[in-house]
Amino acid sequence: MSLRMRTRSALQMCTKWYECLAPTMKEKGEWGAGDDDALLAALQTCGACEETEVSWGDLLRGRTASACLRRWKVMQRWVPAWAEEGFQGCVEKLAAMRAAQLAKKAQKAAEAHAEEEERNEVGE
């Protein structure tokens, strides 16, 4: 693109894009898996026994208290019978669910790697 513009370098174009034209996920309020993991880890270590004891504004840098609380409300609904689980129960179940997802992903990656190794051995 900078070649077509001829008035801006590639670095200037990139800077303009990221700083002005494309708002960040945080500015738009979007959450990624890494953000969910960070929120969950913060909730596990904050020492709160109830939702009302959480200092939501101090959990994640760059996220407001209301944004963290709203995301928590979304996340807790991923737990079956979340209303009966309570705050700590939801945090524990979500952590277990995430650990299972990561283990499954690691297993698939290991299987794919083993298949690739096998193909490479056959091809030699």
Image (cartoon, helix red, strand yellow):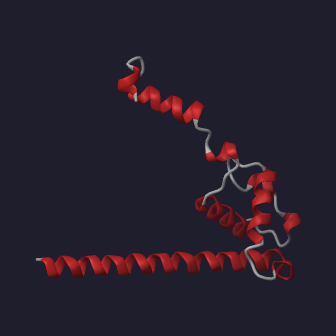
Q: Please tell me which residue lies in front, 70 or 44.
A: 70
- Residue at image x 76%, y 76%? 90
Residue furthest toward the right?
52
**What quarter of the picture does the N terminus occupy?**
top left
**What quarter of the picture does the C terminus occupy?**
bottom left
Vertical placement of 112 versus 29: above or below? below
Q: Please tell me which residue lies in front, 84 or 41.
A: 84
* Image location (x, y in percent) of residue 41: 66, 66
Q: How many marks?
A: 0
Residue 96 falls left or right of residue 74: left
Residue furthest toward the left?
124
- Residue at image x 68%, y 45%? 28
* Image location (x, y in percent) of residue 93: 71, 80
- Residue at image x 60%, y 62%? 33
* Image location (x, y in percent) of residue 59: 73, 56
Residue 80 falls left or right of residue 14: right
Residue furthest toward the top?
7
Vertical placement of 101 versus 16: above or below? below
Residue 47 falls left or right of residue 122: right
Instruction: Determine which quarter of the picture holds residue 81.
Output: bottom right
* Image location (x, y in percent) of residue 66: 81, 52
